[in-house]
Image (cartoon, rainbow, N blue to C red):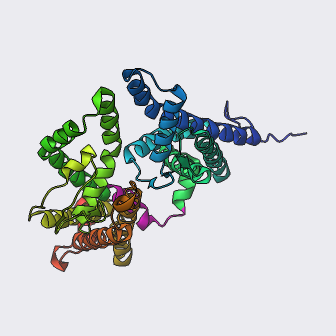
């Protein structure tokens, strides 16, 4: 009598059974969200406590923690409201901190959660969203500032959105079987467009960062003069410094909008675009000392050139990732997708860098996200498509013959 030996699939050590892996994904998602919220709140609370101690610690500590909580929620995109005004201009520096923390947490969760199916990925993201939303809502409920409120639903939604976005990017970066399965569903000619769009967007970000640095260095005297006029004291200087650092990425997005063309409105009267400046009184915030009296004539050329270079870079990167025998239709579609992704990213950044800064003329600050995104997307996408077509086209006499190359290699 013979017996058949059947090879059974092995369970890797530490993976456990499917229910255990699902539970691990849920717990890791909740742990990552809690870590992101606690550390993000601590980043805001630390300078607030230092300023409080520097001022003599005369105010109750709960008030200081409430200020830190309000700043943390503002960095997540929530709006602080009073009876007469609201403040919803997001300090994107704090948003970036939360995103980086969530990204690192997503990488860790992806490496330690045995994410082999989409259901486990969804469970982890759901747990992270719910946990961050609950913590954001609790902080909004516990604010003890007189006359200042934050909508709990908005706070929960923003905390969950920022956290799950960073965690999702981290999970994608960590790799895994689920990601490979997802990428297989994306048409191969378009798969390289996503990474290429990141490179194209990096060109725009680099130009905006360089121009922002030039503006800060050129207006350093105006900024320090404004601080002298305010005379906030040592604790106030620290608070203004931290606020300026938090709003520095927001300023960079405004500079990017000026480069693209439409520009931004800083008050109801003051507007800055690539074509000029509409002057007027500005609030006494140090970073606004970079607003020039006029824009140089080369700025529109710089903005157009930056978008053209961004499209060229995107096109070259797509070309390197596409197959040599790819049809021209797919080639053009890949370049157009780069423009669509870049335009969408620019529009989202412009939307995040807009909002109310107070009453009256400060009720809405920022640019036109849709217009800025359309202009950037069209120019970058068109240049990417032209670059791809130029790289694919060769005169007939210059095209290498496959038969000739094969015979030469054999000989």
Residue 241 in the image, given as x and y percentages of width and height: 30, 35
In the foreground, 337 or 105? 105
Q: Residue at x 16, y 40 (%)?
A: 225
Instruction: Tell whether 376 sits left or right of 295.
Output: right
* Image quadrant where one finds the N terminus: top right
Picture layout, residue 372 above or below residue 73: below
- In the image, 396: left or right of 347? left
Quarter of the image with the C terminus is bottom left
Q: Find out whether residue 23 is within the magenta segment.
A: no
On the image, which quarter does residue 359 sit in?
bottom left
Asked whether 235 or 310 is in front, the reply is 235
Is the magenta region chiefly helix, strand or loop?
helix
Residue at 61% across, 46% down = 133
Any part of residue 246 in sight:
yes
Judged left or right of residue 107, residue 237 is left
**Residue 349, percent across and down?**
38, 58
Q: Residue at x 52, y 46 (%)?
A: 148
Give the magenta-colored segment's residue range. Answer: 185-199
Quick one: 139 or 229, which is closer to the camera? 229
Is residue 7 visible in the rendered structure shown here? no
């Amino acid at each position: 009598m013979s017996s058949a030996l059947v090879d059974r699939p092995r369970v890797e050590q530490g993976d456990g059974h499917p229910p255990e892996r699902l539970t691990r994904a849920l717990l890791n998602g909740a742990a990552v969200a809690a870590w992101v919220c606690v550390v993000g709140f601590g980043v805001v609370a630390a300078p607030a406590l230092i300023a409080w101690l520097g001022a003599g610690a005369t105010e109750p500590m709960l008030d200081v923690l409430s200020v830190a909580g309000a700043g943390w929620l503002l960095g997540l995109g929530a709006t602080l409201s009073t009876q007469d005004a609201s403040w919803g201009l997001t300090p994107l520096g704090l948003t970036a901190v939360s995103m980086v923390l969530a990204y690192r947490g997503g990488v860790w969760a992806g490496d330690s959660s045995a994410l082999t199916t989409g259901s486990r990925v969804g469970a982890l993201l759901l747990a992270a969203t719910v946990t961050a939303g609950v913590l954001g809502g609790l902080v909004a409920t516990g604010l003890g500032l007189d006359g200042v409120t934050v909508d709990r639903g908005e706070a929960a939604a923003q905390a969950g959105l920022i956290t799950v976005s960073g965690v999702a990017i981290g999970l994608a970066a960590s790799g895994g079987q689920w990601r490979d399965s997802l990428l297989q569903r994306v048409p191969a000619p378009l798969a390289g467009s996503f990474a290429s769009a990141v490179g194209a967007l990096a060109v725009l970000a680099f130009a905006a960062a360089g121009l922002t640095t030039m503006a800060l260095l050129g207006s350093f005297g105006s900024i320090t003069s404004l601080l002298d006029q305010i005379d906030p004291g040592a604790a106030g200087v620290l608070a203004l410094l931290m606020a300026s650092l938090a709003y520095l990425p927001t300023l960079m997005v405004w500079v990017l909008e000026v480069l693209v063309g439409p520009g931004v409105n800083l008050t109801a009267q003051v507007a800055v675009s690539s074509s000029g400046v509409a002057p007027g009184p500005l609030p006494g915030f140090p970073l606004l000392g970079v607003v020039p009296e006029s824009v140089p004539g080369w700025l529109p050329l710089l903005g157009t050139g930056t978008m053209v270079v961004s499209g060229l870079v995107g096109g070259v990167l797509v070309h390197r990732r596409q197959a040599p025998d790819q049809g021209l239709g797919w080639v053009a579609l890949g370049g157009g997708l780069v423009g669509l992704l870049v335009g969408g990213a620019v529009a989202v950044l412009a939307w995040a860098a807009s909002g109310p800064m107070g009453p009256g003329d400060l009720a809405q600050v920022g640019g036109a996200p849709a217009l800025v995104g359309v202009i950037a997307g069209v120019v970058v996408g068109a240049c990417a498509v032209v670059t791809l077509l130029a790289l694919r086209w060769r005169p007939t006499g210059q095209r290498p013959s496959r038969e000739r190359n094969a015979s030469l290699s054999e000989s």
